[in-house]
Image (cartoon, helix red, strand yellow):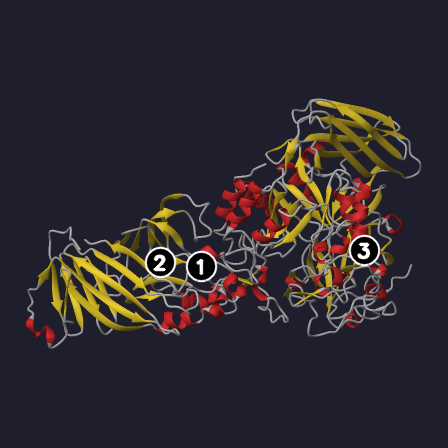
């Protein structure tokens, strides 16, 4: 992989983490947490918990009516309890032995590279099980290229969703995206108008029963803006932003204050907890919402997500 | 006449002393009143009434209609409104099964056996709540000396009426206007009107719509002072010649002549620019007719150009003084079936429609003019060109508004009996009513008649619909025949015949299905179909839905006999309440009021949320409907 940055990224070969630093950015990948534990740009933390692949969507009325959630229920458990089984590190494209103690005793506080890739492998809790990898490649400008690969397995029920979920410590004040107007799904995006849109707050579409919502298909980039952190020493309320942009192809995303499980659990909007986080999920595959009826008709076949086939998606998190 | 509570149990008793249904035209005394749309001949009785609630008939205040009855224990209630939303009676939502499911065993009278009269089923029903309503009024000066009728626009589900202690009449059919003559019982000064409203009657079996189950006087009540010469009924037939240019204007008036009054009637038709295009004046008789008057170069009415002509009927006494003015705006349009395709003004009709329940999250089905105007603004903004009044006649204003806005109407009767033939999703018509049960026939025919007579002059109505999900039998065939006998300018719709094909040549001019997948529709259309196809309900927009509309849209281009459909539905039915924990205003649905058996959130299928904010799916509707604006 060629790096376009002239700067180099500093590598901190920790005992539990791999730190990657540069001017005004610092990222910590945790072997214990099984993912990117910290993403700091300009002194602001962007992660509350390590991002993980996500597989569930809060059941829509259509899903409930046709029994989809029942048939695909094992993806809910996987979504909640996904385990990381391994991590692997490559420096300038060359794999190295996992640099934990004592392997990392050979390094110093002055280790640099053009780019570093760390790949986490996750095993699903499905029967049969399969694996998903999330690979992060960081260069000297702090740009992170993310690649997610799902490995299809015969016998697995259709996927409700496939994405990588970032939970941010505080609620976004707004997000701006370059994509389609409104809330869109693969089978409901013809009426949308391409453009640049800013959404204030983190609105949850007020379906009478909280359910999957807020999807934005065919997005070129999205910038999330917050104005608070959880850092007790940071009293500023000046806005700060992080941008996710397309890499190989446009992506879908939703930016909500809740996970699919939180939405799933509520029978009314008012049962949702007070918004405290930002849940930004970048999706590589989105299931249609359907609409023929709500008591049995399936989503049209071309809008299903097969779990028996491989899926790949990638995007970039802008550096500084 | 002595009112009998047993009428509640008898499907053959559904109107007692009600005046015959007639056109919904309005009367004014002067041109200035017409302009202001404020008639001095009308006196509203909306407002605060005295009210007493009873949990069942045995606890009701018998005799409360007597002037000397001690009503000191009565509360007050706002009319119009639902009893349940005023805090009396449990709120309940249910779809197909009857609201007494799991609590009371009932079978419709005569459905299983000719001997089964259902005596006491509702008159002694432990679930049959009763509202005793009382109001007083003194006639406005402008109504005094006139023939006074009272109009109840909607009372759910059975009502008995008294004036000054005299029994006046009885009505069922919650969604049609009930009108009674008060003249014989009026007195000078203050009059005492009493209405006893029962939540259930035999009508319950045929008013099983998928909706919150309410009761009460939920639409307006008014007195009308009819002059001694009065247009009782008006039948307007503005036909269009096949050249689509020549109008054929027909008008029939039925006049009330209290004491054989003499006088005259002037008729004037003006175009939208105010030019008089036709006028005539005749001495009155009981009947008045304009027969096949040719009007050249007419401007056609359609969705994209709802051009209306203005009809003014002036009724004058012998001296030539105006007694009443009837204004009515109408359009010229030609709707017909040509080569098995429904055409409007010579072109294939494409229905970009919605089903619309009357709904207001604060007021239930007691909707306001502001609600109606907001809905039409949403229609316009999203290329919605048609509405099905599911599954009952709407408030009268809605029909006028649709004429003016150019919204094609499928005017549906108040009929839905799916609980008698559809059980847990299966077709099981073992005790279906109305079916072919003779004792139920007149009740449903009366509903067809009320719907037709009230709304027959509205240009916007292209279809009469016999009701919803009531299976098919001789009784519904009789309703179909009624419309065919009375109206050759519109088509008749009924979906339920697809459940009982024996009747397919006697019921419905079109093949109508609900929720048929696009592939099934294609199969019908490629197999030498008898009738054009419409979806009376499709794209079930429950929650986050409305995906895959492109597959229906594709049928429009492929099959001329596929003529579009009505999305289910326009607005979520949910109720605004104060959250018991946070005090916030929140929306609640079936089961949230401890109401069981329930279908919970199934009432939330709208393009709009219940509070009239749009759902995201609306942009998709706007796009696809915008491709076929006509």
Left or right? Give the position of B183 relative to A253: right
Please give the chain letter of the residue carrying mark 1: A
Please give the chain letter of the residue carrying mark 3: B
Residue B568 visible to the viewer:
no
- Mark 3 vs mark 1: in front: 1
- The residues bearing labels 2 and 3 have C-alpha atoms spaced at a distance of 55 Å
Residue nearer the viewer, B95 or B485 = B485
Q: Which residue was labeled with disc 1?
A: A304
x and y, in percent, of residue B192 in the image: 81, 55
x and y, in percent, of residue B41 in the image: 77, 40
Left or right? Give the position of B618 relative to B280: left
* SS label for mark 1: loop
Q: Respond whether the residues carrying marks 2 and 3 are from the same subunit.
A: no
x and y, in percent, of residue B58 in the image: 79, 72
* Quadrant housing the N terminus of chain A: bottom left
Q: Which residue was labeled with disc 3?
A: B475
Q: From this viewpoint, which residue is outermost toward the right?
A: B260
Please give the chain letter of the residue carrying mark 2: A
Q: From this viewpoint, which residue is outermost toward the front?
A: B527
x and y, in percent, of residue B324 in the image: 80, 34
* SS label for mark 3: helix
The mark found on residue A283 in the picture is: 2
Evaluate if marks 2 and 3 touch, with contact meaning CB atoms under 8 Å apart.
Answer: no
Q: Respond whether the residues carrying marks 2 and 1 are from the same subunit.
A: yes
- The residues bearing labels 2 and 1 have C-alpha atoms spaced at a distance of 14 Å
Residue nearer the viewer, B134 or B338 = B338
Above or below, comparing residue A14 to residue B329 in the picture: below
Left or right? Give the position of B77 relative to A39: right
């Amino acid at each position: 992989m060629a790096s376009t940055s002239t700067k180099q990224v500093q590598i901190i070969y920790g005992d539990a983490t791999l730190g990657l630093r540069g001017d005004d950015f610092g990222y910590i990948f945790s072997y214990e947490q099984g993912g990117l534990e910290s993403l700091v740009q300009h002194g602001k933390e962007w992660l509350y918990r390590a991002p993980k692949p996500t597989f569930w969507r809060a059941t829509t009325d259509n899903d409930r009516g046709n029994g989809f959630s029942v048939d695909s229920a094992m993806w809910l458990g996987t979504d909640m309890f996904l385990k990381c089984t391994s991590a692997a590190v490559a420096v300038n494209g060359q794999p190295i032995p996992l640099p934990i103690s004592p392997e990392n005793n050979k390094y110093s506080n002055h280790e640099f590279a053009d780019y570093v890739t760390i790949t986490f492998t996750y095993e699903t809790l499905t029967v049969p099980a399969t694996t998903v990898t999330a690979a992060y490649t960081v260069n000297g400008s702090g740009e992170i290229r993310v690649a997610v690969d799902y490995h299809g397995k015969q016998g697995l029920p259709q996927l409700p969703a496939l994405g990588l979920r970032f939970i941010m410590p505080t609620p976004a004040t707004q997000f701006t995206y370059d994509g389609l107007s409104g809330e869109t799904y693969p089978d409901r995006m013809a009426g949308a108008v391409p453009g640049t849109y800013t959404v204030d707050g983190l609105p949850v579409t007020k379906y009478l029963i909280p359910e999957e919502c807020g999807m934005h298909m065919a997005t070129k980039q999205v910038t999330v803006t917050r104005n608070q952190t959880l850092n007790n020493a940071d009293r500023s309320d000046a806005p700060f932003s992080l941008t996710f942009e397309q890499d190989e192809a446009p992506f879908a995303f939703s930016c909500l204050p809740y996970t699919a499980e939180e939405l799933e659990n509520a029978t009314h909007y008012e049962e949702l907890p007070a918004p405290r986080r930002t849940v930004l999920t970048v999706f590589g595959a989105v299931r249609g919402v359907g609409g023929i009826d709500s008591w049995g008709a399936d989503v049209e076949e071309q809008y299903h997500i097969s779990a028996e086939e491989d899926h790949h998606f990638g995007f970039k998190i802008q550096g500084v | 006449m002595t009112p009998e509570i047993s009428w509640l149990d008898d499907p053959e008793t559904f109107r007692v002393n009600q005046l015959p249904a007639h056109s919904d035209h309005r009367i004014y005394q002067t041109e200035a009143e017409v302009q202001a749309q404020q008639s001095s001949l009308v006196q509203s009785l909306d407002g605060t009434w005295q009210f007493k609630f009873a949990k069942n008939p045995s606890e009701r205040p018998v005799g409360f209609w007597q002037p000397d009855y001690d009503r000191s224990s009565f509360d007050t209630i706002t009319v119009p409104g639902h009893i349940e939303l005023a805090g009396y009676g449990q709120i309940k939502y249910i779809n197909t099964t009857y609201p007494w499911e799991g609590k009371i065993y009932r079978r419709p009278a005569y459905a299983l056996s000719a001997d089964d009269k259902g005596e006491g089923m509702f008159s002694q029903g432990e679930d049959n709540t009763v509202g005793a309503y009382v109001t007083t009024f003194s006639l406005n000066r402008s109504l005094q000396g006139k023939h006074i009728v009272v109009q109840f626009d909607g009372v759910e589900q059975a009502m008995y009426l008294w004036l000054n202690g005299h029994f006046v009449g009885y009505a069922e059919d919650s969604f049609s206007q009930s009108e009674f003559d008060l003249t014989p019982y009026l007195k000078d000064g203050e009059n005492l009107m009493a209405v006893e409203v029962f939540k259930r009657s035999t009508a319950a079996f045929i008013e099983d719509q998928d909706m919150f189950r309410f009761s009460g006087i939920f639409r307006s009540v008014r007195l009308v002072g009819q002059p001694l010469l009065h247009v009782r009924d008006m039948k307007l037939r503005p036909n269009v010649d096949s050249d689509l240019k020549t109008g054929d204007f027909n008008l029939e008036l039925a006049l009330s002549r209290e004491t054989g009054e003499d006088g005259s009637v002037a008729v004037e038709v003006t175009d939208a620019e105010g030019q008089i295009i036709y006028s005539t004046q005749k001495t009155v008789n009981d009947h008045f007719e304009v027969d096949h008057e040719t009007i050249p170069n007419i401007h056609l009415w359609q969705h994209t150009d709802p051009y209306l002509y203005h009809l003014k009927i002036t009724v004058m006494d012998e001296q030539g003084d105006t007694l009443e003015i009837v204004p009515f705006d109408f359009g010229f349009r030609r709707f017909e079936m040509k080569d098995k395709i429904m055409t409007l003004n010579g072109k294939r009709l494409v229905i970009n429609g919605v089903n619309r329940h009357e709904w207001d999250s604060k007021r239930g089905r007691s909707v306001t003019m502001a609600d109606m105007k907001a809905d039409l603004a949403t229609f316009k903004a999203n290329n919605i060109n048609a509405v099905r009044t599911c599954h009952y006649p709407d408030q009268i204003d809605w029909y006028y508004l649709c004429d003016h806005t150019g919204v094609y109407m499928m005017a549906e009767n108040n009929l839905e009996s799916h609980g008698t033939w559809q059980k847990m999703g299966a077709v099981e018509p073992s005790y279906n009513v109305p079916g072919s049960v003779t004792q139920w026939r007149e009740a449903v025919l009366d509903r067809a008649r009320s719907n037709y007579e009230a709304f027959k002059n509205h240009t916007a109505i292209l279809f009469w619909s016999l009701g919803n999900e009531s299976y098919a039998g001789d009784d519904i065939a009789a309703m179909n025949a009624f419309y065919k006998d009375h109206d050759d300018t519109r088509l008749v719709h009924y979906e339920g015949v697809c459940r009982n094909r024996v009747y397919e040549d006697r019921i419905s001019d079109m093949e109508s299905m609900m929720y048929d997948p696009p592939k099934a529709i294609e199969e019908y259309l490629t197999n030498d179909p008898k009738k054009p196809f419409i979806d009376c309900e499709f794209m079930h927009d429950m929650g986050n839905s409305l995906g895959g509309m492109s597959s229906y849209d594709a049928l429009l281009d492929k099959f001329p006999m596929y003529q579009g459909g009505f999305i289910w539905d326009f607005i979520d039915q949910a109720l605004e309440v104060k959250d018991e924990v946070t005090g916030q205003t929140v929306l609640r649905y079936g089961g949230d009021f401890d109401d069981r058996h329930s279908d919970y959130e199934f009432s939330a299928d709208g393009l709009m949320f219940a509070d009239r904010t749009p759902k995201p799916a609306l942009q998709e509707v706007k796009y696809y409907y915008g491709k076929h604006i006509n």
